[in-house]
Image (cartoon, rainbow, N blue to C red):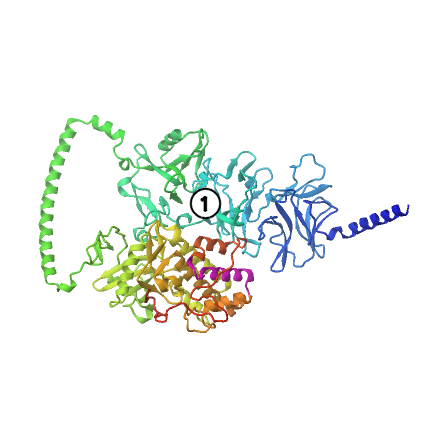
Amino acid sequence: MKTLNRHGTAFIFIFIFYLIFYPFLSVAIDTITPTQPLTMNQTLVSNGQVFELGFFNTSNNFYIGIWYNQIQPRTIVWVANRDTPINSSTGKLTIIDNGNLMLVDKADTAVWSSNQSTPMVKTVAQLLDNGNFVLRPENDENPENYIWQSFDYPTDTQLPGMKLGWDRKSGINRVLRSWKTNEDPATGDYSYQVNMIGFRELLLLNNDGKIIWRTGPWNGRKFSGVPGMKTVSIMQFEFEENSEEIIYSFEMLNASLYSRVVMNSSGIAQRFVWAETTKTWNVFWSFPDDYCDKFGECGSFGFCDANTAPMCNCMTPGFEPKNKQAWDFRDGSDGCVRNRSSKLDCGSDGFLPLKNMKLPESSKAFVDQTKNLSECGEICKKKCSCAAYANMDVTEGGSGCLIWEMDLVDMRRYADSEIGGQDFYVRVAASNLGESPMTKSSKNSSSSNNKVVKLVGITIGSCVVLIFLIILFHLMRKKLQRLKKLESDIPAPEKRVKDFILKDGVVVPNKRDYYGETKTDELELPLFDFMTLVMATNNFSNSSKLGQGGFGCVYKGTLKEGEVVAVKRLSRISEQGIEELKNEVQLIAKLQHRNLVRVLGCCIEAEEKLLVYEFMENKSLDMFLFDKEKNVTLSWKIRLEIICGIARGILYLHQDSRFKVIHRDLKASNILLDRQMNAKISDFGMARIFGGDQNVAKTKKVVGTYGYMSPEYAMDGHFSTKSDVFSFGVLVLEIISGKKNTGSCYTSSQHNLLRQTWTLWNEGKALELLDESIRANIFENEVLRCIQIGLLCVQEHPEDRPNMSNILLLLSSEIAQISLPKYPGFFIRKRNTETEFSRIQDDLRSINEITVSILHGR
């Protein structure tokens, strides 16, 4: 009896303890009930341990969110009260009397609610394994009878099974909206949503409703503007339109694989896939990704092709640039128009097939789901206002057609159908299709009189042409004789082959160099008259001068049309300047990116050699960064955007352009800033093109700027993409600190930026590196992450440095894992009690303030 009393007393004690302290224990269940709310120190975990729901905080604000339970660092996929945070560490999520979910703060004031109008007496809220948080009747036999679900109110992330688009019954339109910043989940500036007007596709919009990028229409297998979507084998995509909904969703074919789509705060839509082996999120695709992804970049009746130079093309034959001058300056936004010789005639027009095309913007396209492609062509031919048509569904047995009656906008051509695009048929005049059957028929029925008239006409025409050719030959012969005489009067030293020649009104590199070797590339670049540039720059006056370097001077100029430009005038005595111009002309037609400065043309007359660039209102980064009065204008947000812009530009050079390009002279003075402080890389005079399989090159003549050069390049002349990565790392640390890296082995650690950063990092004081002028308003995690990325880039050994695609991923994602940096370049490790010392040879000469520093490698 005594034993029973002891056991009974113990049981009662445990039961009372459980009742008192249960609310404060970590909840390991997946459900909230009216009697069991969720408090700050508790979380829900889905039944299969996939997702977790609870409170999280950022910048002293508290939110209810959902994240992956077993993935670190925390990856948040949904936020309930994104625009109404709790400002204290006390709050709870509960089910109130009318069955709704409600988030309340410490004063029991409602902060957020599920806000369902239909009252329910008994409900429960459950976190499911697919990441959906649902509110349902407590004893409903149908577990999918949801009163409310988080999948109907996404934030910035789409998960497998989550639908984007419009539910016609409830009127809910499911849209992804970016976070305001990486640290602030409030509604940001960009949205990713299903197009509700016209045909089915996804749009990326800014807050003004302007289209930034679009997927292209869904064709039954893929979006025509999402490369590689067709070949994805781990996912299944669905776009459904019926009487109940217009939705897009995806599913993972292997439930153990994780993938998500994120609309990030920078205006980029990205798909991530979790790599279990490396424990990181890998970017599967990202949009907009390049120049051709920008909406409407080539205007009406123009299409973009990343494999051509320039990238904007008219839908030839029968079309020409609407604004030829702007087109020559690589601005295709005005698009194309039909030329005079290609007037349409509804009765005789035909259709030109274009392969692998991202279909045009389709908000006003006509859709007929009952017609096949052949019937669609017949409809379009009879309808004189029809500009183009295409298949609506390209799957086997698919039907339906799309017809455009307006200007065709935002098209792109891909290299092959496996990458992207589909067949597209554009209306053109019969003359642009060659000889049509109608023309043949009329010829067979022509009378003999018409034949005689044609024969006489051909005879007379031939005689006129013959006479013209004889006169032309005579004039050319006399001109050649005069040129030969002039050439004989030129002193022998001047008789070398010219660097450039005038061909069809544009300047191109000469096919022969000084040694008689044949050049295969002829890259066209618009030609400016020298006097035009003299007038534009007020005779190259000092008041127009923007800057000066070893190559010569840069001037601000205003053309007759009012366009403001920057004119680089190469020094007459600078041989390096001549080589720089030749190299830049050879590269210019191959490179186009929003983070590269555009070259608009050149001028080569007598001893004058000039390049004309787009004008950058805020000049170069160094003019702000190293000026104590101006650097306060570079807030941390602006500095981070500059870092990311430089990274995107280098990634394009290394990986996404037609050629692998090594810049070799990345530095603060070669980063220009436009009116909105967007960074653009300039000066490609030192750049080198690598072959497809080439990774490293060696030179006996090391060129660049001391302080930015990697050790393997400065000492041994070896350069590669990792050399540019090193320079980028120096730039990152300079942008963070506002201090210039001297790169000298003789300066104290106080002045050597790499040494100073490494010391502070190891002492746990890395934030002390941050420019004092911006320490008030920062996100410490962002700053520390950027410092760590900078140190990874300047590691001593090239193979330890990340490539630019990884760097951009680390910059754009706070959840991607980042490794610890090793020793920076130019310094070897301490041995015993010895001090660090430089690996740079004592005889290296530096020219810090001049664009070109010439060093001789070992």
For the image, the number of numbered tags is: 1
Q: Give the range drawn in magenta.
A: 777-798
Determine whether 120 is above or below 73 in the image: above
Looking at the image, residue 330 sits to the left or right of residue 178; the answer is left
Looking at the image, residue 483 sits to the left or right of residue 32; the answer is left
Residue 630 point in image, percent of width and height: 45, 69
Residue 566 point in image, percent of width and height: 33, 63
Determine whether 355 is above or below 633 in the image: above
User: Residue 613's image quarter?
Assistant: bottom left
Q: Regarding mark 1 in the picture, which secondary structure is present there? A: strand
Q: Is residue 663 visible?
A: no
User: Residue 577's image quarter?
Assistant: bottom left
Q: Nearer the viewer, residue 360 or 510?
A: 510
180 inside magenta stretch: no
**Amino acid identity at mark 1:** Arg
Q: Residue furthest front?
A: 832
Instruction: Say which residue label 1 marks.
Output: 214
User: Residue 318's image quarter?
Assistant: top left
Q: Nearer the viewer, residue 252 or 643?
A: 252
Residue 40 point in image, percent of width and height: 68, 54
Q: Nearer the viewer, residue 481 or 689?
A: 689
Q: Give the position of the N terminus as an image quadrant.
A: top right
Q: Which residue lies furthest to the right in this view?
A: 1
792 inside magenta stretch: yes
Q: Give the position of the C terminus as an image quadrant.
A: bottom left
What residue is rendered at 88% in x and 47% in y? Answer: 3
Looking at the image, residue 229 sits to the left or right of residue 73; the answer is left
Q: Is residue 463 visible?
A: yes
Residue 666 point in image, percent of width and height: 38, 62
The residue carrying pointer 1 sits among few (fewer than 14), some (14 to 19) or many (20 or more) residues within 10 Å by Cα, namely many
